[in-house]
Amino acid sequence: MYNRLDSLSSIFDYVVEMRRYFHMNPELGLEEFNTQAKIISELKSFGLKPKEIGNTGVVCDIDGKGSKRIAIRADIDALPIDDAIDKPYKSRKPNACHACGHDGHTAILLGVAKFFSENIDLLEGSIRLIFQPNEEKVPIGGAKTLINEGVLDGVDAIIGAHLWQPIECGKIGISYDRLMACADEFTINISGRGGHGSMPHQTVDPIITGAQIILALKMITSTSIDPLENSVLSIGLFNAGSAFNIIPDKSVIKGTVRTFSQEVRETIFRRIKEICEGICTSNRAKFTMEPIFGYPSLINHKSIVKVIESSASEVIGEENVLHIKPVMGAEDFSYYLQKIKGAFFFIGAGNVDKGIVYPHHHPKFDIDEDALLVGLKVFIASAINLFK
């Protein structure tokens, strides 16, 4: 099997071509109709029978000689960002850019499809290719929609990956347990009583109240949460007022909470409410809090990670398989792992020497395209070994 992986040059060239096509023609979540059509066209050219799913997604089975079915998932949507890279494959669409690597994920999975369609004798079971739309739109996501439409029916295990700029190209990052966090949001609307800045005693100041709430919220993770638990609470917005000498009626606070444990998640949101109640009562203000619960934490299944690690060690070298700490970003691949066994890993895509240094969701984000070959090899080897 591995001698065939050594001759992937033509498929790698194809994967690079596809990645650049999708990068030049990005589409936002729930708008990926041209992306869907291109994926279907490519799969049909391999003699496969893809189907539409989730409105703008694609699912396709490659049937081998066994009964076990392994799924591989790639997300296909772009971000509402203007592309600022100085490359021939720069996005042709304003306010649409693959600044997270989903173009590479889609291209790698098409490469996997091409390889197995040409080497179907290696399949001791069936491969289900899942091209998932709308991963970026928290809390909606695309995984739940596809699951509800039966994308996991008959699937024994699922694997997926993310091109990851913080890891050097040529390596992958794995975790045997926690990998990515829950991503929740909250909005706090504070109502006071406005008035002239020279007469604060006649007002209920929503700015002072909001400032006190923000300072208290930042204490939650250090005073209410076990220090051995991972948790983050960050404030991203505090808006109030429009003039220097007028105390406004209202203020708004928005922030994010990142956790792994459901218990920690519930504790933080309970404490947010308690803090708002206490401070608003003491300041004679009122408030409403609107939580938005995003994707659950991504917890890998150890048995599947073990196969990925051993497979990757064989095809890219044991020294290039890194055991990494969890990250506080989120991924709706977590929904698949709540239903069946599976695992998610990171494919190193950064390269300082090539100037590939900008983080995900940055207008100048790009990948070292050599990472596509790494992903191709690891997915193919892992899928074959999972059948065993």
Image (cartoon, rainbow, N blue to C red):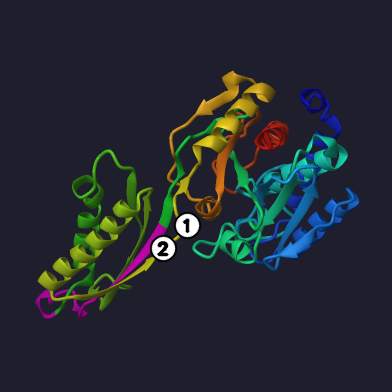
Instruction: Read off the magenta span.
Output: 184-202
Residue 35 badge: none
Q: Residue at x 21, y 61 (%)?
A: 213
Q: Is 153 or 367 nearer to us in this picture?
A: 153
Q: Residue at x 49, y 35 (%)?
A: 175
Rendering coords of residue 10 (x, y %):
86, 33
Please, what secondary structure does the residue beneath circle 1 have? loop
Q: Amino acid at mark 1?
A: Tyr
Q: Residue at x 25, y 58 (%)?
A: 214
Rendering coords of residue 257 (x, y %):
36, 55
Which quadrant is the N terminus positioned in?
Answer: top right
**What residue sits right under mark 1 in the picture?**
295
Rendering coords of residue 206 (x, y %):
22, 71
**What residue sits right under mark 2 in the picture?**
293
Q: 124 left or right of 294?
A: right
Q: Quadrant of residue 59?
A: bottom right
